[in-house]
Each structure stands twice: as structure tokens, then as C-alpha cells.
Image (cartoon, rainbow, N blue to C red):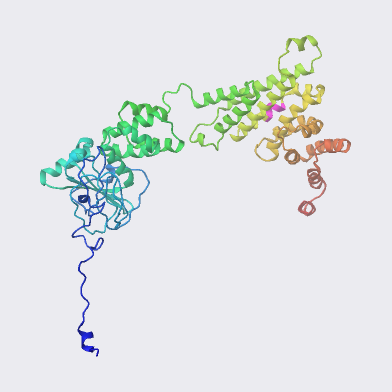
Amino acid sequence: MHDPTRHHSRRREPPSHHRRAWCCSFTVPPHSPENPSAFPVQNPKKNQSLLKPEIPIKSSSNSLSSSSFPNSPQNTSYRPGIVTRIDPRRILSPGRVSPIDPPDPVEMPKPVTTPVECEQESSVRDDCSLGIFDVRLNLKGKNGSGLVLELSSEVLSKNSCVFADLIAEYRKNSRGLCRIEVPDVENLGVFRDTIELMFEEDIARKLIKVGAYRAIDVLEVSAGIKFNRSVLSCLKYLEAVPWTEEEEEKLRNLFDKMKFDHETARDISARLYAQDMTDSQQTLSKQLVWSVTTCVDANSRNELKSLVKGLLCKSSVYEKDCPDLNKVDIFAICLSCINSLVSLLEEATTTSPSVKLAKKEDRPLIDRISKQVDNIIWLLEILLDHQMAEDLVDIWTKQGELLAMHKCASPLVRYELSRVTAMLFIAMGTGKMHCRSEARSGLLQTWFRPMLLDFGWLQRCKKGLDMKALEEAMGQALLTLPLKEQYVLFMDWFKCFSKHGTECPNLSKSFQIWWRRSFLRGSETHASESR
């Protein structure tokens, strides 16, 4: 019979062995890649770093101000946790234990791991010949992150005058581990990269891998800690490579803050700043404009027009704090183009075969006329951008020779003159050019009727001209004249439009406004215009 007391007297026997805890107990670390004692001893490769986390260091007596270590404005993040000793140049996630064996086992002292809550921590070492790590460099980022580097005082003192002085001062008062704190570091990653360069024989090769932008950051930190070997390598590398606009601006800001005495720095400054220029900007602008107007190849001329106009434009990024254009120089070039246009019109309207033969050139006459007209329009656009185009209205109004030749020239030739007139009308009608009443009246009295004759040709050969904008601007320009002068010009338009129809501009809307203003009074005028 089953005895129930037996059931109560039986107890669960304890297991014969206990499973070893990995992450919960740090008294006896297990054999793993994080425990180098499990591997055979070999000499590590030269110039490799050893990363070792440590407990975060509080503020110590030896600390450096943030002004001694300027850095780039990039930030690195960190994660708190427990980190153990790991292979050279290999960082595991906090608290992670990797079961993967390292490819190259190295000799390390037996670690003593301690559970800590810390910022991202690591140590740097070049080879086993340096011995123990006798300097702990505690970097404090501006964003609250931190980085701890355990280093050799011999390497630090050899490469940095700043650290050499701090270590020597520390050794006077105490022995053992030297603690140095650097507060307000702007970029922990750049600072670490700069320290690692102390263990590199060929710094230039490392800079080639990271590029010019990162090299500027490294140069800034190296100059702050007086790491002269790195400063020289950075300067030589930056002088030899091209820069983007962002890199150029970054380098210029650095050179404004710091002074570098090396000859290579002077070569970089020569690329950043214009020194001992023989020609002023105004003189150079005149030369560029003149070269464009005399350019022979049409494709090259059009490309250079866009380039120079973009450089001289007031809204251009290249025109910051620069003096304005020399008005006299630009108008001198305008007059030269107009005089060339007069000579070409004389050649086009002459009846003497001997004159035509004497002036014969490879390029057709109409192409040469069109080139000069294009030059005048291009100069007008530059003058409008700088608000200096009003005097060109007076110059064009006084071209009696061109007006006389317009009457006897063929439509294919004379309509080129009306292209210039059209651009002046558009500038006045849209308010881009503010002329005196006499100047507006003179231009319209002189060139309005020729425009009526050439409007049909302008419609067929627009060459980039906005005909709707031209019609609207002509009407608006007419309405700026006294009513009596408007009457004469509007009647000329009415007669031309009644004969030629769409070959003339449609100024019906402006004509109605003139009519109401002339013959209706008071409230009637206001009511009519509001309809």
C-alpha cells in the first residue's frame, strides 16, 4: 500500500553543477572573445589601437578649457550601458557578449570588468611596447555625451605640446594614473580621430580616406592641441586637393580664427584670398563685358553672356559687398555697339557696289547687324539690374541717323532696330525704368511709328521677345504722357490698326482708357474705368 508520508519526505535534489552566469556575475568572467586569457599569446600588429572602456571620470584638477580644442559642429551620439574589453578597433554594443572568435588573437592583460553606467568609452593604444595606459583623457561633449580615452603619456607628450605640459605638471604633484578632462568638446568623433593619428606613421594616407571636409575638422583640433605633425599633414593635403564651395567656406572660417605659419598655409591663403590684384573688380568687369560684345563665335558669345550677366547680377552670390558697376565704362561700350550698328546700316542702305565690295566680310551683313542689336539688349538688361538704364533712353532717342536709315532699309534689316525699341518700351511700361517725362515723350515721339511698321516682323521673328508683354507695355507707356500727346500717338495707332489689323499692336484697352480720361469727367470717369 502506498505510504503518503513518503511523498512528503521526498525532496528535489540540487543539480550536480551550476551554470556559469555571463552577464549577471562579473567575478569570474567566462572564456570568450572578450576574455583574452583564453587565447594564445601573440604580438599585436604595429600601430593598431586598443579600445578599452572605463568608468566615467569626474572633473579632475587637470582639465582643459574648451577654447583650447575647437571642433567641427558635428555631434556623435552615445548609449549608456555595460561595456567590456574588446579586440583592437572593434566596438560592441553596450552589454553585448560576442561568441565569435577574433581572427587575430592579441596579448592583453587580464581584464577586470565592472558593471558601470557610462557614456561611450574607449581607449587608444598603438602597440604593446607602450606598456600600461597611464593617462586617462575624459572628453565631455557639449550635448552631454562623453568619451574616455586611456592613452600612453609617452605618445601624448611626444605629439602634443599641450598634453606634454599638462602631464608634466600633473607628475609634479602626484603619481599613478594621470587624469585629464576636456570639457565642451564640440565633436567627440573628430577629437578621437585626431588622437588616433598620433599612432599613425603616414597621416596623409588616412586623410585621403576621410576627404577634405573631415581633414579641415582634424586640422582644427590638431591646431588646438598643438599636434604639429598632424597640422602639417592636413595643410599639405588640403593644399593639394580641390574644394567644394562648402569646404572652401569652412576652411576660410578656420583661417579667420587661427593663424598658421607654415609655408603651405600661405599657399592655401593665396587660394582663399585675392592678394595684390593688379586690376580692380570694376576694371575687370569692363574687360569681360567688352570681350563678350566683341566675341566672334555665336555659341561662345551666348554662353559667355549668361556667365558674365550672372556674375554681375546684383542678386548673384558673387556680388556680396562688392562695389557697383562703373556706369561710364558700360555706357562707353553701349555707344561703341551703337556706332557699329550705324556703320552696318549704312552698308545695308548704300547703293554703291564699290562700297559693299570694300566692306565685304565672311559673315552675312544681317548676322552682324543682329549681333550688335543683341549686344545692346544684353547691356540694357545689365543696366536695368543695376538701375542705371535711364540714360540709354536719351541715347537711343537721339539716334537720328538710325531713324533716317530705318525709312529706306529693307524690313528684314530695319526690324532689328525695333527690337531695341521694344525692350525700352517694355522696361518703361512695366516700371523697371523710371524716366523723366521729357525722356519718355522723346522716345515715343521718335520710335513709336517705326514700331507700328515693324510689329508684324517682330511677330514672325520674335527672337525671345514677349509680344503680349510688348503690347501691354506700349499702351501703359503711352498713358504716362500728357493727354494731348497721347491723342496724337493714339490716332496714329488707330489709323495703322484699321489698315493692317493684326500686323499692328492691339492697344484697344489703353485707347479706351485714354478716351474716358479725355472726354468723361469726375465720377463718370471713375465708374467707366472700374467696369
Q: Which residue is located at x 61 percent, y 22 percent?
A: 332
Q: Which residue is located at x 76 percent, y 31 percent?
A: 461
Name above or below for residue 257 compared with residue 264.
Answer: below
State the image quarter where residue 118 is shown.
bottom left
Q: Is residue 396 magenta?
A: yes
Q: Is residue 184 visible?
A: yes
Residue at the far bottom in the pictured view: 1
Along the line of sight, the residue nearer the viewer: 123 or 469: 123
Q: Answer with left or right where residue 210 lies relative to residue 32.
A: right
Q: Position of residue 279 (x, y in %)?
A: 48, 22
Residue at the far right in the pictured view: 499
Report the span colored magenta.
Answer: 393-397
Along the line of sight, the residue nearer the viewer: 85 or 412: 85
Q: Is residue 398 magenta?
A: no
Q: Is residue 255 visible?
A: no
Name above or below for residue 165 compared with residue 360.
Answer: below
Q: Quadrant of the N terminus?
A: bottom left
Q: Position of residue 500 (x, y in %)?
A: 87, 35
Q: Position of residue 57 (x, y in %)?
A: 22, 53
Q: Quadrant of the C terminus?
A: bottom right
State the image quarter where residue 285 is shown.
top right
Q: Which residue is located at x 38 percent, y 32 percent?
A: 238
Name above or below for residue 524 compared with residue 207.
Answer: below
Q: Position of residue 81 (x, y in %)?
A: 29, 58
Q: Answer with left or right where residue 330 lies relative to residue 34.
A: right
How many marks do you count on the picture?
Answer: 0
State the image quarter where residue 160 is shown.
top left
Dominant secondary structure (helix, strand or loop) of the stretch shown in magenta: helix
Along the line of sight, the residue nearer the viewer: 393 or 278: 278
